[in-house]
Image: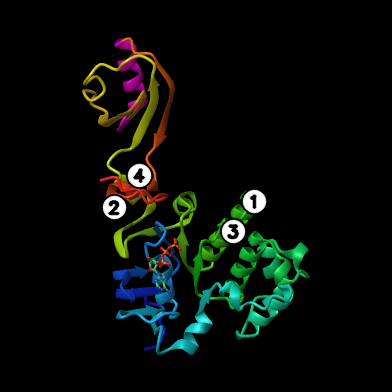
Amino acid sequence: MHATTSSPAVEADRLHKRYRSKVAVEEVSLSVAVGEIFGILGRNGAGKTTTVELIAGLRRPDRGTVRVLGLDTRRDRARLRQVLGVQPQEATLHSALTVTELVRLYGSFYRDPLPTGDLIESVGLTASHRTRFENLSGGQRQRLSIALALVGRPRVVILDELTTGLDPEARRQMWTTLERLRESGVTVLLVSHAMEEIERLCDRVALLDEGRVAALDSPSGLVRRAGFAQRVIFRAATPVPDGLLEGLDEAERVRADGDRVVVEGRGDLLQAVSVALVRAGVVATETRSEQAGLDDAFVALTGHRLDTEETIR
Ligand SMILES: Nc1ncnc2c1ncn2[C@@H]1O[C@H](COP(=O)(O)OP(=O)(O)OP(=O)(O)O)[C@@H](O)[C@H]1O
């Protein structure tokens, strides 16, 4: 089958991958539209890297199929290479070559590579373009790997942990690079732990948990599934009467851990909680309110926290 403009950028159908006794990816199906920035979010070991390696054709699934722009990732490998950009494994890069030499080398694999200097500038490596790979810092290596994924003007690019190890300025620069890619119609598959990055950049997100897609929606759609809109947190310097906060229309859940109280709910929750506490004569300190985020959605949908091994229910 030929790549057509009507094909989804990525179509994965019931992918399954087992490493010996460990099932890493189970029945994962995704369809990513052309021009989307699509996020894959999950805890360590959730199966994110395995999923994108299956999509990139770097691993063979035990079951299931993948098409990228209509191309079969196993059978149409040569054509796939020309349209798909992936970050190389560090171990495969020659450590004695400089940034410029590596960009040129990778560019030589493609028909119409991006101009070397422009690409190096766009990832902020101009000042280190003569530095050998072995002497680059972690963040500089990360920038280089992104440049190498982009050098062939891919129509679909897979980026794993885009901004891990980058300083705040470099992170913003990468975000701008991604937004430009989207404007030019490139599809991006973004594996990330960074929720801020996912919320800001992604059109849709698959939450992966224990090898399965726990939910797939826009970031705001996922946040709505957290079951509450905001939370108010305070320290109670004097006891809170039983049932006081639970009785508020705005409150959905109240948790106390010692003197720290967390109220989840909606509407003008901060105002409602503050007024109730004042009326009951409760002395509260360190009161603050937070909007629900993707991490709350993750807990609501999977029972796990994103950043720890802890299970909530
Ligand atoms: N080559 C391998 N051999 C055996 N087990 C593997 C291999 N690669 C991954 N695994 C296991 O498969 C599961 C999924 O791993 P994977 O790397 O896909 O997760 P991940 O979500 O990308 O994790 P992380 O966020 O830590 O990178 C993990 O339990 C991991 O230990």
Residue holding disc 2: 302
Which amino acid type is marked by label 1? Glu
Does residue 117 lie above or below 304 as drawn? Answer: below
Residue holding disc 1: 169
* Mark-to-mark CA distance, 4 and 1: 27 Å
Residue holding disc 3: 174
Which amino acid type is marked by label 2? Thr
Whether the residues at callouts 4 and 3 have beta carbons within 8 Å, the answer is no
Left or right: 118, with 302 as reference point: right
For the residue labelled by badge 4, is the local secondary structure a helix, a strand or a loop? helix
Residue holding disc 4: 296
Residue 275 appears anywhere in the view: yes
Which amino acid type is marked by label 3? Met
The image quarter in which residue 25 lies: bottom left
Does residue 32 lie above or below 56 as drawn? Answer: above
Which contiguous range is marked in magenta? Answer: 263-280
Q: Label the magenta part by its dominant secondary structure.
A: helix
Whether the residues at callouts 2 and 1 have beta carbons within 8 Å, the answer is no
